[in-house]
Image (cartoon, rainbow, N blue to C red):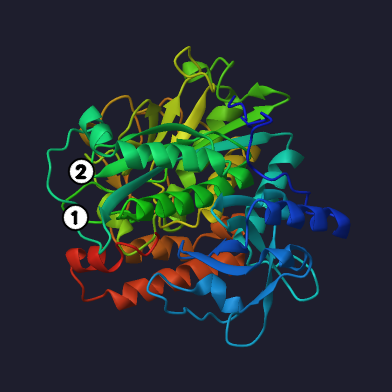
């Protein structure tokens, strides 16, 4: 089981803030603490269904108002698109208003004079909006708790550094995972490490990746909502630090067609009464029967939920065999070509047994992606789905069938079931739009909205080449 990690030393620069049930006196004290730390501007962020971070800011003296009543936002905020278009739906139009309410328990200073916090969408009557992705993830976590299950999640953020004007950095030799990349970028990496920790994001690894000018930050596991919040905050801090060093950063799934893509892998562990489901059992690699069912649920839902995990106009270009992006709907122990990589609980894995969904990319709304991952795992557990046979080699060598409506063959003990995930956006979105399970996990409104924003992309880039799409979306998620 993954153990949640928190920093508790007294030198921690984060201002301690009250919970979301704070009294006015507590909020006033928090505001004064932020002011004394030099904070002038408080920014609250929310992700739209295209995975783009939107924000509203207030003077820090308005913390209480931001927390209690929120700032106005059109319902169309959730269906803003990666090109800043708006994908109206039958239920979302020009009429109405939502309130962005900041979670005061998560507010912290992230740069000189600047503080940040995540927000939730509320209706005018004070009820949580059904369109709120963060709220939907919290609801799925509550569903897990009702089953006696405690989830923890971690994430790995890959990104590519560019020039300030969005071009490739000057050509130099690049050694994948190499020390030369660290030496050349050491001032940026040292600043990034310090800035992340000052902001309360606890990176576990920071290293050069396989792709040229590509790096990865791995975040400590946490409860699902906290993990998603930390992911958004980390991306903001990475952008701030890159700008300080006269660079820009791309979180596109594929900034350049000819270069490596960026992933946003999600790790999941589940425990019951303190015992992990992916270890301590008598199943493959020590997993329990419920752990196997969780894996079966995730795999069975992959074709339907791919539009949530990697549904942008450029995402399918990243999901190709041989790229370690998990382009095949199967599972295997430490199999980096499988969509679902299993990590056994060993001495070399101190967090304990867990699973990694590799197909998620930075264009996903991470709250929705996390809800889909956890929800499909819970579906597998509640329906006692049998664990599919493991793929212990490169899935490309097994032979893949095309994805059908029935999903993954889950006949335990049969030959390994390997499905090649769809490689075009239309097929990906058709499967999501027709998915009853997606509606069950995420709600009809969120599914409708996600499909709408991705259909908008499909239409905008209908006549564009892959190279043109990559260029147009290089900084859409930065």
Which residue does the numbered mark 2 point to in the structure image?
212
Q: Is residue 23 visible from the viewing direction of this image?
A: no
147, 273: nearer the viewer? 273
**Based on the displayed image, in which of its 4 quarters is residue 158 positioned?**
top left
**Taking 135 as reference, is 213 above or below it?**
above
Residue closer to the observer: 8 or 260: 8
Res 213 → quadrant: top left
Q: What label sits on residue 411 in the rendered view?
A: none
Task: List x then y, in percent, for residue 299.
Answer: 45, 41
420 to 80, vertically: above or below: above
Q: Earlier in the sequence, mark 1 or mark 2?
A: 1
Q: Please indicate whether residue 460 sits to the left or right of residue 234 in the image.
A: left
Are circles 1 and 2 on residues that touch, CB within 8 Å?
A: yes
Q: Which residue is at 56% across, 44% downward?
A: 199
- Secondary structure of the residue carrying numbered label 2: loop
At a point 56% along the width and 35% down the height, the residue shown is 294
Q: Position of residue 302 (x, y in %)?
A: 44, 48
| Residue at the (80%, 57%) spot, across then down | 27
In the rendered view, tell whether residue 75 sits above or below residue 298: below
Q: Which residue is mark 1?
A: 168
| 10 Å crowding of disc 2: few (<14), some (14-19), many (20+) | many
x and y, in percent, of residue 138 in the image: 68, 50
Q: Position of residue 96 (x, y in %)?
A: 67, 84
Q: How many marks?
A: 2
């Amino acid at each position: 089981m993954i153990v949640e990690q928190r920093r508790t030393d007294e030198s921690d620069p984060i201002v301690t803030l009250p919970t979301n049930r704070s009294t006015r006196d507590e909020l006033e004290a928090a505001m004064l603490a932020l002011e004394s730390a030099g904070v002038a501007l408080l920014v609250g962020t929310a992700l739209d269904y295209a995975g783009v971070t939107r924000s509203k800011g207030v003077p820090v003296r308005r913390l209480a108002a931001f927390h209690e009543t929120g700032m106005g936002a059109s319902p169309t905020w959730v269906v803003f698109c990666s090109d800043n278009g708006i994908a109206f739906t039958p239920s979302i139009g020009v009429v109405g208003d939502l309130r962005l309410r900041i979670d005061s328990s998560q507010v912290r200073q992230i740069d000189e004079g600047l503080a940040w916090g995540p927000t939730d969408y509320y209706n005018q009557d004070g009820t949580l909006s059904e369109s709120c992705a963060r709220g939907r993830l919290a609801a799925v976590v509550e569903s897990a708790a009702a089953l006696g299950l405690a989830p923890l999640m971690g994430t790995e953020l890959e990104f590519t550094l560019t020039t300030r004007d969005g071009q490739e950095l000057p050509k130099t030799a690049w050694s994948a995972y190499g020390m030369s990349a660290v030496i050349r970028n050491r001032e940026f990496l040292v600043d990034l490490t310090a800035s992340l920790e000052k902001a309360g994001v606890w990176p576990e690894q920071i290293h050069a990746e396989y792709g040229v000018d590509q790096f990865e930050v791995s975040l400590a596991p946490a409860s699902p909502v906290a993990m998603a919040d930390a992911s958004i905050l980390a991306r903001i801090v990475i952008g701030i630090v890159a700008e300080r060093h006269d660079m820009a950063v791309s979180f596109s799934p594929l900034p350049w067609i000819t270069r490596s893509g960026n992933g946003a892998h999600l790790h999941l562990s589940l425990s019951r009464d303190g015992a992990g489901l992916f270890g301590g059992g008598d199943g493959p690699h020590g997993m329990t029967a419920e752990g196997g069912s969780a894996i079966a649920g995730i795999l069975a839902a992959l074709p339907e939920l791919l539009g949530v995990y990697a549904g942008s106009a450029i995402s399918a270009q990243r999901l190709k065999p041989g790229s370690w992006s998990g382009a095949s709907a199967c599972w295997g122990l430490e199999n980096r070509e499988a969509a679902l990589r299993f990590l056994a609980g060993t001495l070399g894995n101190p967090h304990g047994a867990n699973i990694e969904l590799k197909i998620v990319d930075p264009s996903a709304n991470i709250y929705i992606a996390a809800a889909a991952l956890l929800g499909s795992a819970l579906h597998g557990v509640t329906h006692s789905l049998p664990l599919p046979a493991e793929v212990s080699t490169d899935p490309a060598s097994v032979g893949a069938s095309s994805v059908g409506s029935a999903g993954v063959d889950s006949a335990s003990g049969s030959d390994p079931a390997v499905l090649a995930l769809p490689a075009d956006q239309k097929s990906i979105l058709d499967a999501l739009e027709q998915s009853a399970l997606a509606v069950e996990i995420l709600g009809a409104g969120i599914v409708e909205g996600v499909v709408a924003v991705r259909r908008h992309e499909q239409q905008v880039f209908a006549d564009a080449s892959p190279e043109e799409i990559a260029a147009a979306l290089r900084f859409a998620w930065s």
